[in-house]
Amino acid sequence: MDIQKDLHETLHGDLCSMAFPAESFDVVYSAYVLEHIRDADVALNNMLGSLQSGGLLVVRVPDPDTARGLVTRNTPFWFHVLYHRWVMKRPKAGTPGYAPYPTYYHPVISKRGMQAYASSRGLEWVAVFSDNFVRDGKGLAGILFRSGARLLELLTLGRYTSQYNDLVYMLRKPAPA
């Protein structure tokens, strides 16, 4: 069954070493991938190389500078697996093919890092959006997690927000002059 009926092509593989066809895509979309790649800048370079002039690069990542991002960056992977298994009720969590996956949060995926990346490559900064698409869990555990995120926001005087988690970057590759 083809779920991606609106896409012409999907590619699966190692974004750091895959040889993409040069300038062959109008739009390159990546969601919840780059935070799991140690060399996210290399992956972005590969995606950018496959983008046609005037094409759009859309990248969705968890913002490392939020309350949830701070917790994710500072807790061990086994804790994430435990949370997914016991709170989110996903018994296969952490096994091959099942989230969560190890996170690395390369500096390029932060808002400041992505702005620097775009500037260094002459990309047009089209937009950045934030959203609060989070799966905290249900019941008491979900309430505790949301409350903990709000408490962290208060304790850091708003430095690490609990109001959203993800950022969506939209960058345009310049057309030739």
Image (spheres, rainbow, N blue to C red):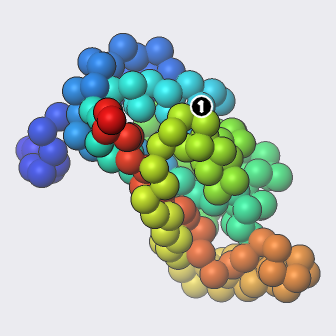
- Residue 88 visible at all: no
Against 13, is 140 above or below?
below
Q: Nearer the viewer, residue 83 or 9?
A: 9
**Corner quadrant of residue 148:** bottom right
Which quadrant, please, contains the C terminus? top left
Residue 81, position as x, y percentages in the image: 64, 49
**Corner quadrant of residue 67:** bottom right
Against 47, is 32 above or below?
below
Residue 137, position as x, y percentages in the image: 55, 73
Q: Nearer the viewer, residue 151 or 7?
A: 7
Q: Which of 172 and 1 is in front in this view?
A: 172
Against 75, is 104 above or below?
above
Q: Is 26 placed left or right of 110 in the picture?
A: left
Q: Nearer the viewer, residue 163 or 52?
A: 52
Q: What kind of residue is marked 1?
A: Asp
Is label 1 in a helix, a strand or a loop? helix
Which quadrant, please, contains the N terminus? top left
Q: Name the residue under label 1.
A: 41
- Residue 115 visible at all: yes
Which residue shows up at 81% across the image and 81% down it? 158
Question: Dot 1 surroundings within 10 Å: few (below 14), some, or many (20 or more)?
Answer: some
Q: Is 174 placed left or right of 101 in the picture?
A: left
Q: Is 137 placed left or right of 11 in the picture?
A: right
Residue 126, position as x, y percentages in the image: 43, 59
Which residue shows up at 49% across the image and 55% down it? 125
Counting labels gives 1
Which residue shows up at 12% across the image and 39% down it? 8
Q: Is 95 placed left or right of 105 in the picture?
A: left
Residue 144, position as x, y percentages in the image: 72, 82
Which residue shows up at 9% across the image and 49% down it? 5
